[in-house]
Image (cartoon, helix red, strand yellow):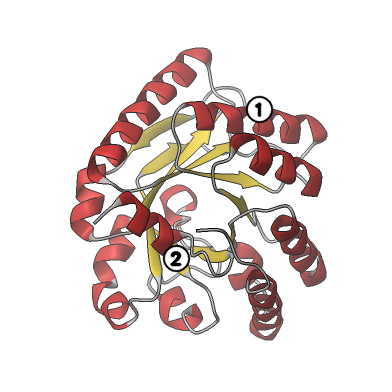
Amino acid sequence: MSMEYRMRRTLPSDRAAIIMPVDHGLIFNRIEGLETPSAPFESWAGSDITGFMMTPGQVKQTEAFFARNPQLTRVLTIDTYYDHTQLDGGGSHSLITTVEEAVRMGVDSVKMLFPWNISRAERAALCNRVGKVVTACDAWDIPLVLEPVLIGAPRTEEVVVEEEKVARIAYDLGAHIIKIAFPGEERTRRLVEELQVPLVIAGGPLSGEPAETVDAVAQTIRAGARGVIVGRNIWQRERTAAEKVMSEIATLTRSVEFAD
């Protein structure tokens, strides 16, 4: 399979992607709404999403399901980070599997965190780690989704500005797709125009009213992002409200097409 094939699987050209992340157990352990790690696939596959972001354990447990639903893409999380509550450089990032193993498992792309509120020594080690993963991804023709983030930090103006800067570092390291927390419509548009690498926007933790989530997605799409990564803002809501939000988001994502 080629890089182009897997990129098109991950980010279709006839719409913006909706990828539902359900990989939170790698960091949060048992989390509300994800008590049974394999449950979201059957539950949400028919809601017009394009795929899931998942763990190695979930990939192994759901092989038959995805064989029956080949239209859904699989983004494999290949790393973890501890402790996500530490903001003083006390965290530790590491890979949990390899790019070669991801290809063997048949997924469409791999995803890594790029946490930047860590020590300078760990930043250098992280960049080295990402560089090796990018090299392996290029060798195996599989895209890397890299997520610049100040993990656990409050969404202050300073944090948003810093994450925008770190997105540039992710670009320079060779990320094929950049995933970033929504920095606002103007900053999203600037990142899309300047980096010219597919950008996807993370939905983040459950917060605000459903209309706020839908409005953020609308701004994301207007700004030219190729997709949204939305999980807890959907599956941690009451089911009827969550289905309504997902329907409205799906309509927005089908309002655009991207050049081949």
Q: Is residue 100 above or below residue 18?
A: above
Residue 224 horizontal side relative to residue 107, left or right = right
- Return the x and y of residue 98 as percentages of the image width and height: 25, 42
Picture disc at residue 45 = none
In this view, the residue farthest toward the top is 121
Residue 34 horizontal side relative to residue 87, left or right = left
Q: Which residue is mark 1?
A: 165
- First of labels 2, 1 by sequence position: 2
In this view, the residue farthest toward the front is 260
Q: Nearer the viewer, residue 99 or 191?
A: 191
- The quadrant the N terminus occupies is bottom left
Marks counted in the figure total 2
Task: Residue at 23%, 52% (x, y): give it.
Answer: 103
Q: Nearer the viewer, residue 187 or 20?
A: 187
Task: Residue at 32%, 48% (x, y): give it.
Answer: 142
Disc 1, SS: helix
The amino acid beneath tag 2 is Phe
Label 2 and label 1: CA atoms lie apart by 27 Å
Q: Residues within 10 Å of mark 2 (few under 14, many from 20)?
A: many
Q: Is residue 59 above or below residue 159?
A: below
Disc 2, SS: strand
Q: Nearer the viewer, residue 82 or 193?
A: 193
The amino acid beneath tag 1 is Lys
Q: Is residue 169 above or below residue 37?
A: above
The mark lying in front, picked from 2 and 1, is 1
Picture disc at residue 52 = 2
